[in-house]
Amino acid sequence: MTSSLDEALQRSNLSQSNQMEMLTFRLTDNQLYGINVFKIIEIIECPHRIDRMPNSHPAVKGALDFRGNALAVIDLSEAVGLPTKEYRDELAYIIICEYNRSLTAFIIHAPETLLTRSWSDIHKPEGVNAVSLVAIAYADGGEAIMLLDIETILSNVVGIERDLSTVAMTEAEGKGSGRHVLVVDDSRTAIMLLQSVLDKMGFTNTSVMSADKALEYLEKEHSRVDLVISDIEMPGMDGFTFTRTLREHNDYKNLKVILHSSMSNPSNRLKAEQSGADKFVAKFDPDSLSEEIFSLVEI
């Protein structure tokens, strides 16, 4: 039987080979969805009673006591516009996940299985205007697996801190003038949040939604780029592989790189360092991000 240590090493090695292990699950439309296992803390049966929190989004069903912490419980089906999960009357499950340095509990219909996929086999849908959908993979039998933009969902349902503090704003305002940042992220919400901070700091910026597009941009414009801020989880090529690719290229090997991810556990900080990134910053903390940017870019 594979030991816990062996499993941990196998999962760690995925980040060295442009792969991701996902848990697949169903929502109320019976469609197959997937989530990176690195974000999952625990899966539990949903209690039949969750006390409602006043003045909250309709998809927030209440709060859950998890190891002494009060977690917001979000019906993931309702959050993406599907019929709500009737957890009081039928069996449901909760996935407890870590996003953006915080724990959140998502109600799902049913978990299914674990699958490993190369990021090169995970594709961003073209011509589809679905703000909560970020990519599509395929199960062994050919069924589509929808990967959701959890950052957009959380922003819409519970909100995300968007602005620099007054102190950070005073220190940062306009100091990036004359410098250019390349933003690489497959989430439109994440790009919007990053651009808002960079604009306030005075940086000009260009955004692309994949590592491949970033490499195409750098091939033409690398001389004007002072810093790259990249997500880790991206269809085609993940942020670890993207950073290693930059370090292997003579023109980019000294380019400053920040990996910026909602996977905020310490192991990802270590993997970012091993891939050659200059910094790892957990999403989304505008003050910490601005501090790390100024630590890398000479002003």
Image (cartoon, rainbow, N blue to C red):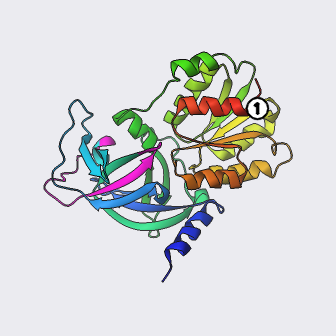
Q: Is residue 129 left or right of residue 108?
A: right
* Residue placed most toward the observer, 30 or 97: 97
Amino acid at circle 1: Val
Q: Is residue 158 magenta?
A: no
Per the rendered image, the range of residues in magenta is 79-102
Which image quarter holds the C terminus? top right
- Dividing the picture into quarters, in which one does residue 31 lie? bottom left
Q: Is residue 139 left or right of residue 278?
A: left
x and y, in percent, of residue 204 in the image: 68, 23
- Dividing the picture into quarters, in which one does residue 261 lie? top right
Residue at the spot 71% in from the left edge and 41% down from the top edge: 257
Q: Is residue 89 magenta?
A: yes
Tell me if residue 131 can be seen.
no
x and y, in percent, of residue 17 in the image: 65, 63
Residue at the spot 61% in from the left edge and 57% down from the top edge: 120
Q: Is residue 202 left or right of residue 53?
A: right
Residue at the spot 15% in from the left edge and 53% down from the top edge: 88
Q: Is residue 141 above or below residue 106?
A: below
Q: Give the residue pinned by disc 1.
A: 225
x and y, in percent, of residue 267 in the image: 57, 56
* Residue placed most toward the observer, 278 or 233: 278
x and y, in percent, of residue 146 in the image: 43, 53
Q: How many marks?
A: 1
